[in-house]
Amino acid sequence: MHSFTWFLILYTGSVLLAVSGLWFFYEKRDRKQFDARRKRRVFHCVRCGNLYSLRKRDASDGQECPKCGYKNYELSF
C-alpha cells in the first residue's frame, strides 16, 4: 500500500506540472499574438474603399493606400 501511495502522489504531481506547463506556454503565446495585433493602426481609403492596417511605428501623418496610392489617415474609434 505504501508504494501505491507514492505512485499516486508522483503521478498526480506530474500531471499537475504538465498542465501548468502547457497553460504557461499557451498563455505566453496568446499574449504575444494579441500584442502584435494590438500594435497595428487601421486605415480606410476614402477613394477606393480599401481597408488596411500597418504597424504603429510605420504609421505617421498618413499612409498611402496599397491599391490606389491615395494618402489616408488613421481611423479613430
Image (tube, grey):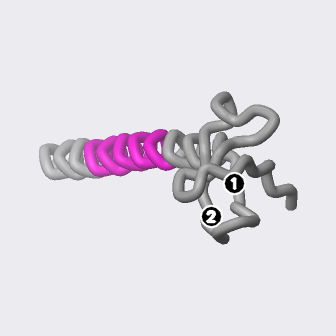
Q: Residues within 10 Å of mark 1 (few under 14, many from 20)?
A: some
Q: Main secondary structure of the magenta part?
A: helix
Name the residue at 64% across, 31% down: 58
Residue at point 66% right, 70% down? 49
Residue nearest the observer in this picture, 5 or 35: 35
| Amino acid at dot 1 | Val
Residue found 62% across the figure and 64% down from its top:
51
Between disc 2 and disc 1, the foreground one is 2
Image quadrant assignment for residue 24: top left
Q: Position of residue 27 (x, y in %)?
A: 49, 46
Check disc 2 and give the amino acid type. Leu
Percent x, y of residue 62: 76, 41
Residue at which label 1 appears = 42
Q: Which mark is residue 74?
A: none
Tell whether 3 sits left or right of 49.
Answer: left
Range covered by the magenta-colored residues: 13-30
Q: CA distance from mark 2 to mark 1?
A: 7 Å
For residue 35, what is the image quadrant?
Answer: top right
Q: Which residue is mark 2?
A: 51
Relative to 17, 45 lies left or right: right
Residue 34: x, y in percent?
57, 48
Q: Per the image, is 27 magenta?
A: yes
- Provide the secondary structure element on which disc 2 rests: strand
Image point 86% across, 61% down: which residue? Answer: 77
Answer few, some or many: residues within 10 Å of disc 2's Cα (few below 14, many 20 plus, some between 14 and 19).
few
Q: Position of residue 43 (x, y in %)?
A: 70, 55
Looking at marks 2 and 1 on the same chain, the residue that comes earlier in the sequence is marked by: 1
